[in-house]
């Protein structure tokens, strides 16, 4: 019996680029678009663009969401836009009553059940929503990542204003996006999370904005190197 793989919002885009595929926790993911060494060189020298939609994504909302998360996971971010690393993944505070948790692919189901159990025992209303399939994740990584984002988003991406492991909600190319800075070693990295239906459009906008800087689509093999 053939198992059907889950497809990311950018599956058709990757098909068009002639990607080599890799299965990751039941997802069909782009392993490479061409020569892996060339993709690594783009990440280190200019900027790479990657589809990272397969990761788990949970949105937690409620006036007492922070205290519930602290009790269930052992920690919560101290400030809006702030981050804390928990066993389940990376937790970010978007508003005093809204949090975003990113997990490894397929880990979100167990984490959601754990958080819903913790929320059920409280008098105040806290909701836990799995948005893994509804949001696309697109990563920009490399020394020219800020130059690309600066062309399509009005945020201040200076390291002092937007340090590593910080989250910001903003407009990017007239679309609503959650942008998380997640550096890879010394290389600046940013992941945009936005509506699944807009994924191909945002990917195209970022490719066009990065053309002058030598942007290149990269797969998971290069990201993991």
Image (spheres, rainbow, N blue to C red):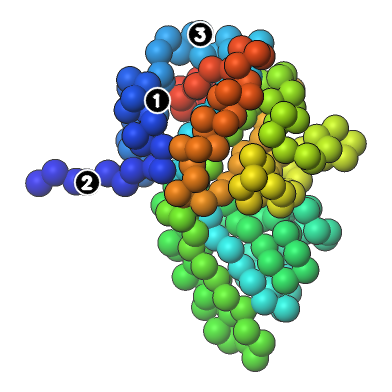
Q: Nearer the viewer, residue 212 or 64?
A: 212
Quarter of the image holding residue 31?
top left
Q: Is residue 176 visible?
A: yes
The reply, left or right, for residue 104 in relation to residue 7 is right
Q: Is residue 188 visible?
A: no
Relative image position of residue 194 (x, y in whole percent) = 56, 49
Residue at (39%, 31%) from the top-left corner? 13
Q: CA distance from mark 1 to mark 2?
A: 18 Å
Counting residues from the start of the chain, the first of labels 2 and 3 encountered is 2
Mark 2: secondary structure: loop
Rate crowding at label 3 as few (under 14), some (14 to 19) or many (20 or more) other CA atoms within 10 Å: some
Q: Nearer the viewer, residue 203 or 121?
A: 203
Relative image position of residue 77 (x, y in whole percent) = 77, 59
Rate crowding at label 2 as few (under 14), some (14 to 19) or many (20 or more) other CA atoms within 10 Å: few
Q: Nearer the viewer, residue 152 or 120?
A: 152
The reply, left or right, for residue 195 in relation to residue 154 is left
User: Is 120 placed above or below 90 here?
Assistant: below
Residue at (57%, 31%) from the top-left corner? 205
Instruction: Give the residue at mark 2.
Output: 4
Counting residues from the start of the chain, the first of labels 3 and 1 encountered is 1
Quarter of the image holding residue 162?
top right
Rate crowding at label 1 as few (under 14), some (14 to 19) or many (20 or more) other CA atoms within 10 Å: many
* Residue lying farthest to the right in this orientation: 160
Instruction: Give the residue at mark 1.
Output: 31
Residue at (45%, 13%) from the top-left corner? 36
* Residue lying farthest to the left in this orientation: 1
């Amino acid at each position: 019996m053939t198992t059907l793989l889950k497809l990311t919002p950018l599956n058709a885009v990757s098909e068009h680029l002639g990607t080599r595929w890799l299965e990751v926790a039941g997802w069909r993911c782009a392993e490479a678009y061409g020569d892996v060494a060339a993709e690594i060189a783009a990440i280190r020298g200019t900027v790479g663009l990657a589809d990272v939609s397969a990761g788990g994504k949970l949105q937690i909302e409620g006036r007492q969401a922070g205290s519930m998360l602290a009790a269930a996971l052992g920690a919560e971010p101290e400030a809006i836009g702030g981050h804390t690393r928990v066993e389940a993944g990376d937790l970010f505070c978007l508003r005093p009553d809204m949090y975003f948790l990113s997990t490894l692919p397929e880990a979100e189901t167990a984490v959601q059940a754990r958080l819903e159990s913790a929320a059920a025992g409280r008098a105040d209303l806290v909701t836990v929503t799995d948005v893994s399939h509804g949001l696309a994740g697109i990563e920009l990584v490399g020394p020219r990542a800020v130059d690309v984002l600066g062309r399509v988003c009005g945020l201040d991406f200076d390291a002092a204003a937007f340090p590593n492991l910080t989250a910001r909600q903003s407009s990017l190319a007239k679309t609503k996006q959650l942008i998380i800075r997640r550096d890879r070693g010394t290389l600046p990295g940013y992941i945009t999370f936005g509506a699944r239906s807009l994924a191909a459009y945002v990917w195209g906008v970022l490719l066009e904005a990065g053309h002058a800087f030598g942007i290149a689509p990269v797969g998971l093999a290069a990201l993991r190197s």
